[in-house]
Image (cartoon, rainbow, N blue to C red):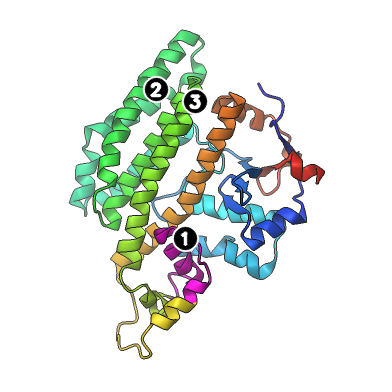
Amino acid sequence: MISELTGYTLTRTIPDSVLAGVLSGSYKVFGGVIRNDSGQIVAHLVNAMQPTNFLSSFSSPVTAAFSGFNTFQLYRIGADVQQLIGLAQASMAISGLTLAVSSAGFMFLNNKINKIDKKLEEMAADLKYIKKFLDLQERARLISALRVIRELGQIGDKSTKIQMLINSRQTLGEIHEKYKALLLEDKNAKELMPIEEYFTVTALGHALCSAELGMFDQATNDLLESQLTWKQAAKTFVGEKVLGKDPQRLLAKKYVRHIKSEEIAGWMDFAENCEIGFDRIDQLRDMAPKVDIKIFNSIDKEEEIAIDVSRKLVQRDRILEGYVDQYKYYSSLKKKPSEMQQFFDSLSEQSKIKDCYVFLSNDKVSA
């Protein structure tokens, strides 16, 4: 087992320079990592509680999104280490993923599938597409593969464990390719939800198997490829199904309870792959009609679901980018995710901040 996180120091404080970097936008928070403008990892943020506690359903309620910190709130209220962690944890809660890829282990993925299935069964009575999805053979194979590998810790024979990983990796890889094809098809919010969830789970499961087999570079490259495919589909959904051709409509009064103006700006940046930020609001205001002639003061259920799905996708994007960074780092150390998790589990409870461990780059510690 490793005894330290190479290049980083466990800390309960973050220098003002790092916090200022986040506020200025030169540092970005991507789930479990903070990157500088050169793409280097300035700090790691690691879950300090059992990852099964982080499960969420397909979309997050509006209250959850608004109660957490986001970058725009940090601008308004200033920042300290707890608020910075709050930003990451809010993103985690909305996305339904953990901050650390090592915590997204086989048990986490298995429990996540169980929760997804429960939600799908509730929806199946009303949606033919969901019922058809539940009958897919690939879904049954996925559940079987995850159930097998979650028992790895109880297997003492090394060769047996390796063979189980090889078999599961192959199964997850085959299933992942089928969900990839489904993900890239044009779908509404309710149809997209289960496909996107299963695509993400198979991507993480396949990468975990590769990394546990010591195929570090392969794990990193595969996860990066999956993340880019996922982002393509997510950007298309947000851009076409939510923003549409008249995103200025989202500034109308009837959307106030459902979405904040800064979220709209962030979603436009996400869909168009740019960083205009707050200036987006002025653009939309300029595009909006002087007089709102629409008489309806509420949005329909379909649009409300699409908005919640978009909120989850944008936050999940940050987590997935952080996962790729973490895999690259673990690959450089030639350490398996399970070895990293054992190290995190060995840390003192007194070292955590808001149920999170903070590892600061040694360069920033000495600065």
Who is closer to the viewer here, 234 or 114? 234
The answer to if 8 sits in the magenta stretch is: no
Name the residue: 36% across, 60% down.
Answer: 238
For residue 67, side relative to residue 176 (left or right): right
The residue that mark 3 highlights is: 211
Q: CA distance from mark 1 to mark 2?
A: 42 Å
Mark 3 burial class by Cα count in 10 Å: few <14, some 14-19, many 20+: many
Specify the amino acid type for callout 3: Ala
Find residue 120 and report its horizontal and vertical position in percent.
30, 47
For residue 139, side relative to residue 357 (left or right): left
Of marks 3 and 1, the one in the foreground: 1
Name the residue: 33% across, 42% down.
Answer: 117
Question: Could you tell me which quadrant the N terminus lies in?
Answer: top right
The residue that mark 1 highlights is: 274
Find residue 158 and report its horizontal and vertical position in percent.
50, 10
Specify the amino acid type for callout 1: Cys
Residue range in magenta is 256-281
For residue 12, side relative to residue 218 (left or right): right
- What number of labels is visible? 3
Q: Secondary structure at mark 3?
A: helix
Of marks 3 and 2, the one in the foreground: 3
Contact (Cβ within 8 Å) of mark 3 with mark 2: no
Q: Is residue 299 above or below residue 91?
A: below
Specify the amino acid type for callout 2: Val
Find residue 131 and report its horizontal and vertical position in percent.
21, 45
The residue that mark 2 highlights is: 148
Residue 300 found in image quarter? bottom left
Mark 2 burial class by Cα count in 10 Å: few <14, some 14-19, many 20+: some
Contact (Cβ within 8 Å) of mark 1 with mark 2: no
Contact (Cβ within 8 Å) of mark 3 with mark 1: no
Q: Secondary structure at mark 1?
A: loop
Who is closer to the viewer here, 314 or 297? 314
